[in-house]
Amino acid sequence: MKRLVGAMVALVSATFVISTPATASAVQGCGSIGKPAVPGADVVSVTAIDKPGGTVEYPPEYPIPPVTGVPPYCEVTAVLTHPGVGDRVTVKLWLPATGWKGRFQGVGGGGYSMGAPFDGMLAEQAKLGYAAATTDGGVDSNGASPAKWALDANGNVNTELLRNFASRSLHDMAVAGKAVTAQYYGRPADHSYWNGCSTGGRQGLMNAQRYPDDYDGINAAAPAINWDRFLVANLWPAVVQNEERNQLSPCELDAFEKAAVDACDRIDGVADRVVNDPRQCRYNPSDLVGTKIVCDGKEITVSRADAEVIRKIWDGPHGWYGFNRGTDLGWVAGQPPFEISATWVQYFIKRDPAFDVSKMSYAQYYRVFAESRARYNPVIGTDDPDLSAFRRSGGKMITWHGTDDALIPYQGTVDYRDRVGHRAGNVDDFYRVFLAPGVDHCAGGAGAAPVDPMAALVGWVEQGKAPRTLPARTADGKASRELCLYPAVARYKGGDPNSADSFTCRRS
């Protein structure tokens, strides 16, 4: 869970580099804020408190630097409910008293957490001149498990709270947040943006699909679209190991990962521990059979049965994407199984928190996969390719996705972009996708992740500068890249392999 939260923070805390003059506004003060009108919901209360700003800390268990230089701000908490539902939804806003640039930003969540789990994430955006908002959707902030809200008192799925989580509370937050922003500054925001990764990325696409007028620009990174399928697919490694009666240790998983990268790293002409185009990596795990490795101080020999388990995991379940060779399988192939996926099956499919997902047979697995898709794709699939209304509204959207993402397959993002393109024609005039070779889920990995995708988005929305590449850096800061506009991929042309100037974008 810490890795997921860290990835979310990495996304929303990117340094904003576009230089624009601060927008003059007459701040009305916290005391001027009343209840906003939110169609379909009743606003129960609004609390507004002047805060001094300064330094905002993250919880000590997360190694994230504090946010310094936060301006004084008004913290607004609005509580609303939907008639007949009995929910209690909180919308939180941070409104900078100085330096507001006329921009509103909705900040997305991660896992089952619908909004930003820490104040530091709002502090980052207030420091950058945004009026920043987030919502809990009326569900628990535990990103790994929906145990506190998924089932009602009778043990049935709480469909109203699931609807909040999937879509409804996104629109409520945008409406309430922009209304409160207008009250505080005495005028509406000039531009509105969405910023999120993983669940936050899925939320961005849901905004574009169902609420196309809510945001002018959407940064939807590593989007958790195909939610009803990829969560179940993440249990495939556990099912394979159960059925084959062969649970691989972390060091065995690492050995196959290293062997695949060793075999495919130089395909692009550069030895950088990054498989530049996973489609070109065809490493056969059987090549590692007979190799001796040391696990927990004991020497073991890789068997043909071990290689067969890896082959089946890499191939993936029938009808869905597999796992890329060279991807870190520790996320999904270890024990216990990946919690977000396990709890999805336990609560929303089986409605039995005690159900042991690690003991599913192949047949059981495929039944669960089919039921999840049939029941929940219309609710939370978020894969509708019809973005015509978002396009007509003038909206712009950027998605970037790491190719080593073991949790949400980048192939799903590519498929979605292609389906949007088939409907829309020149999709690049409003929706652009960039792949980040060697990058894990939202951040991390050996590859280069975008430095500041929000800057590119704001430049596109406000200045008409559609990005052809996204500047990117490796986590250690040693190498730079320019992520290519899909479907182009980076090709090495010679020179310093750590410099973006040594690469060019070409179509495959």
Image (cartoon, rainbow, N blue to C red):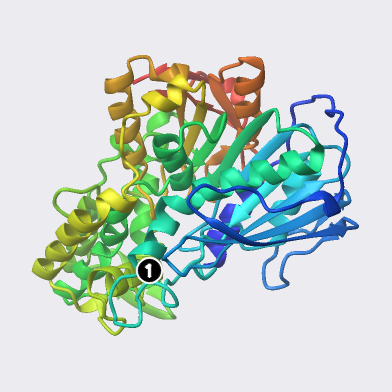
In the rendered image, residue 189, in percent from the top left (x then y), is placed at 71, 33
Lateral position of residue 183 relative to residue 403, left or right: right
Residue 507 vs residue 486, the one in the foreground: 486
Q: Residue at x 57, y 22 (%)?
A: 502
Q: Judge left or right: residue 75 versus residue 224.
A: right
Instruction: Give residue 197's position: percent from left, percent from top.
Output: 52, 47
Question: Residue drawn at (27%, 21%), measured in percent from left and top?
Answer: 422
Question: Quadrant of residue 427 in the image?
Answer: top left
The residue lying toward the viewer, choosing from 294 and 163, is 163
Which amino acid, mark 1? Phe
In the picture, measured across the screen, residue 240 lies left or right of residue 37, that is left
When the figure is inspected, residue 79 is found, relative to residue 12, above or below; the finding is below
Q: In this figure, which residue is indicated by the disc labeled 1?
A: 338
- Given the current orientation, which residue lies at the most extreme bottom position? 354
- Viewer-nearest residue: 474 or 398: 398
Q: Residue at x 66, y 20 (%)?
A: 462
Tell me which corner region of the image, top left, top right, bottom left or bottom right, holds residue 179. Answer: top right
